[in-house]
Amino acid sequence: MALKKLLQQIVLILFLSLIIGLGINFSLIKKYLQGDFQFGFISLEKYDSITFITLGEAEGLFSEGEALFIDSRPKEAFQTGHILGAVNLPVEEYKEEKALDLIFLPPEGTVVIYCDGNECNSSLELAKVLHQKGLIDIKIFFGGWIEWMREELPVSSENDPQ
């Protein structure tokens, strides 16, 4: 009889744990089912030219002038403000590889792609497209615009006087 009661308690604890886990992660589960994480994952074997970098590494590449910074956010966000010298390739416009044929990007150069921050996947989406276009040194600055601004690093906007 004690064994039966113990098994019932174990099942009850497991059931309650499942319900609590689903409740806490409901918004993530909902986003996953809606396809929001479709581009949020990357196979390092398939995309071997893509690496993730920190703010310090991005700042180093920026200060040495060794990389082209690409802002994958929408044009309106880019015009409001962006990393100094960055070019805007809104991922929505360039999801199709054919659209990128209109833009010259040197395949051997280093590119650093960023978007709003670590909850934004447009930089990852664009990196995958650029990888398929043949770029061999793609870095994703996952901290993105938010982290760059927080550290008060050099920025610009379309409205800046030239």
Image (cartoon, rainbow, N blue to C red):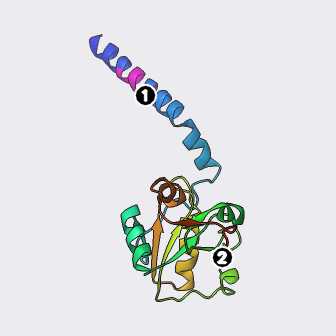
Amino acid type, label 2: Gln
The residue furthest left is 2
Q: Secondary structure at mark 2?
A: loop
Distance, label 1 to label 2, CA atoms, is 59 Å
Residue 107 spot, x, y in % from top left: 51, 88
Residue highlighted by disc 2: 162
| Crowdedness near tag 1: few (<14), some (14–19) or many (≥20) residues, C-alpha within 10 Å | few
Front residue of this view, candidates 61 and 138: 61
Residue at the image point whose x is 68% and y is 65% from the top = 79
Along the viewing direction, whichever of 44 and 64 lies nearer the viewer? 64
Which amino acid is tagged 1? Ser
Give the quadrant of the N terminus. Answer: top left
Give the left or right position of residue 125, taking residue 137 as reference: right
Local secondary structure at mark 1: helix
Res. 27 visible in picture: yes
Inspect the magenta stretch and tell me whether residue 153 lies in it: no
Residue under the point 48% across and 56% down: 147
Residue drawn 53% across and 30% down? 23
* Residue drawn at the location 66% of the way across and 82% of the way down: 100
Residue 13 shown in magenta: yes
Q: Earlier in the sequence, mark 1 or mark 2?
A: 1
Q: Which residues are magenta?
A: 10-15
Mainly helix, strand or loop, the magenta region? helix
Confirm whether residue 54 shows in the render.
Answer: no
Residue on which disc 1 sits: 17
x and y percentages locating residue 133 in the rendered image = 57, 84
- Percent across and percent down for residue 162 are 66, 76
